Image: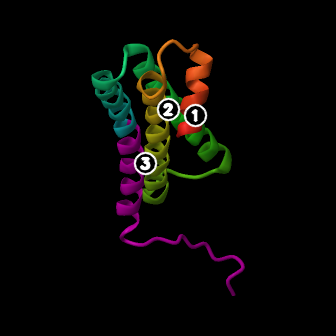
Amino acid sequence: LAQNASATAYHSSWAGHVSRYEAIGQITLSSLGFAAIVVFFMLMLFLPAHLAATATLNVIFATATIFAVMAIGGMTANIVTYMGLVSALGFCLDFTTSVCYNSRYGVPRGLTWNRRMRLSLEKC
């Protein structure tokens, strides 16, 4: 009976779901751009420019890696992936800024950059 039947599944809320997914993708990209700018300027208050730029680049590269994994895995931009992305960036930023701050202020002066970074990583 249903072999030659042609049917399209549709619900009245379908358009709302599609527009919500499109909005989340745009919100994700714009908030990540704003986050990179704010991170850099906030870190400039506490760190020298080269360390602030290093921490900001680390966050940008972590974001690009997460988007690459999402693309390879076929994940879409939805509220769950958005929350995971924000959490991952928060952890990345916290660790990066701790390492940069400790490499500048948490180790004795006069050490080489490699030694200061090693002590900073061990401390964090």
Q: Position of residue 19 (x, y in %)?
A: 36, 54
Q: Quadrant of residue 30?
A: top left
Q: Quadrant of residue 8?
A: bottom right
Q: Which mark is residue 121?
A: 1
Lower position in the chain sequence, tag 1 or tag 2: 2
Does 22 appear in magenta? yes
Q: Nearer the viewer, residue 25 or 61?
A: 61
Query: Tag 3: residue type?
Result: Val
* CB-based contact (under 8 Å), mark 1 and mark 3: no
The colour scheme is: rainbow
Within 10 angstroms of label 3, few (less than 14), some, or many (20 or more) residues?
A: some
Q: CA distance from mark 1 to mark 3?
A: 23 Å
Query: Which residue is depicted at the point 52% across and 72% down?
Result: 9
**Which segment did they paint magenta?**
1-29
Q: Position of residue 103 (x, y in %)?
A: 49, 25
Q: Which residue is mark 3?
A: 86
Lower position in the chain sequence, tag 3 or tag 2: 3
Q: Which residue is mark 2?
A: 99
* CB-based contact (under 8 Å), mark 1 and mark 2: yes
Give the structural element (helix, strand or loop) at label 3: helix
Within 10 angstroms of label 1, few (less than 14), some, or many (20 or more) residues?
A: some
Within 10 angstroms of label 2, few (less than 14), some, or many (20 or more) residues?
A: many
Q: CA distance from mark 3 to mark 2?
A: 20 Å
